[in-house]
Amino acid sequence: MTASLRRVVIVGSSLAGLQAAQSLRSAGYGGAIIMVGDEPHLPYDRPPLSKQLLSGSWDPDRTQLRPDAVIARLGLTWRRGVAAVALDPEQRRVELADGGTEAYDAVLIATGTSPRRVANPLGLTGIRTLRTLDDSVALRAALEDNPRVVVVGGGFIGAEVAAEARRRSLPVTMVEALSVPLSRGLGTRLGQLCADLHVANGVQLLCGVRVSGFEGDGHLERVVLSDGTVVDADLAVVGIGSEPATAWLETSGLTLDDGVVCDSFCRASAPGVYAAGDVARWHNPLFDEVTRIEHWTNAREQAAAAVATLLADHGLGPEPAAYAPVPYVWSDQYGRRIQVAGRTMGAEEVTVVHHDPDDGATLALYRFGCRLGGVAGINASRRLLPFRRMIAGRVGWDEALAAAG
């Protein structure tokens, strides 16, 4: 430890935040680590919130990312249930909602995202989002009341909620603004396969329309759509994406643009400030693009990369490598696993290289220029893995097609 690095503040007690703390300790850093988070819980895993926890197969305690004993050994100073409200890079301090401050030599921002919401001017109950542990517990309780469910948005979170509601034999209507769910990211062919999966499992799928309002007397009773359709409902789950949680940084002077803007090494625009996870927008040299990724794997990997940079900047580690990952995300729906690696959105060409209607296995490749940029599959884990490696190796499109046979 050097005199220039005695206090590290991590804002966001998330996967990225906890991984950063573990990476610091694993590298031999023995100074103070202050973990600030607006939730009262210890860091927990988010993918199970729309899967095992929502279904009831897991209890909330099982989502905790590390056992109590492991967390205790990290020797962290916790500020749980206290939100950060401002950052002063010149004075190197984080201001908190309870009026306190935390001074730092380096700060890692890992505040994640906040869900987008649909206007609810009547203040009706029965309209929910799914982002936090408490959201999932409350939504599970609501599903146990056997409601008529409307899912607003056909992305992965909304799709997993719809799948769980159908597993419970509840009536489900999914409202999707796109003409085909997930088509912006996966393309029309794979998006249609996902849509067909919902319909085959009893979901009423309404595409090309938006929610224009909610009606009811205190509690939700109807969802009104942009084409005039009215859907009876007791519960609406809104899953229309999220926004980086950067409102608390608006007076900081940091460069903000759909997230905390960073260089390829996870450095923000002020000395001693770093960012990782869903909130970070950085230059990924693998694709030569500025991007922000809301994936579990990215939160873990980017936190480790940010810590490597932080330590190197303070003379406590070797020169860091640029953070150049192959993004990866998965979703489980109706017993099918959907996986995506690399870039898919905005692809110049999408080619389905494998489709077996008997077992539902499908694999598609995504071209950007003359390179393989992405791969997506349904029930095709073993077929997908080699192409994920090819993306990291910057393999050309023709070579990828040849490998697909």
Image: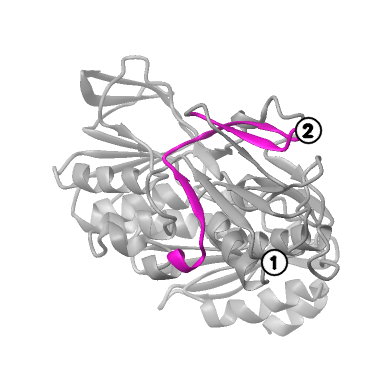
- 208 to the left or right of 327: left
Image-based side of 366 in relation to 283, left or right: left
- Structural distance between the alpha carbons of marks 2 and 1: 35 Å
Q: Residues within 10 Å of mark 1 (few under 14, many from 20)?
A: many
| Image quarter in which the C terminus is found | bottom right
Which disc number belongs to residue 90? 2
- Residue 73 on the magenta span: yes
Q: Secondary structure at mark 2?
A: loop
Residue sitting at the far front: 3
Q: Would residue 187 be seen by someone viewing this image from the given angle? A: no
Residue 320 vertical position relative to residue 277 in the rendered view, above or below:
below
**Quadrant of the rendered structure where residue 93 is?**
top right
Q: Name the quadrant of the N terminus.
A: bottom right
- Quadrant in the picture for residue 335: bottom left
Residue carrying label 1: 326
Q: Nearer the viewer, residue 362 or 84?
A: 84
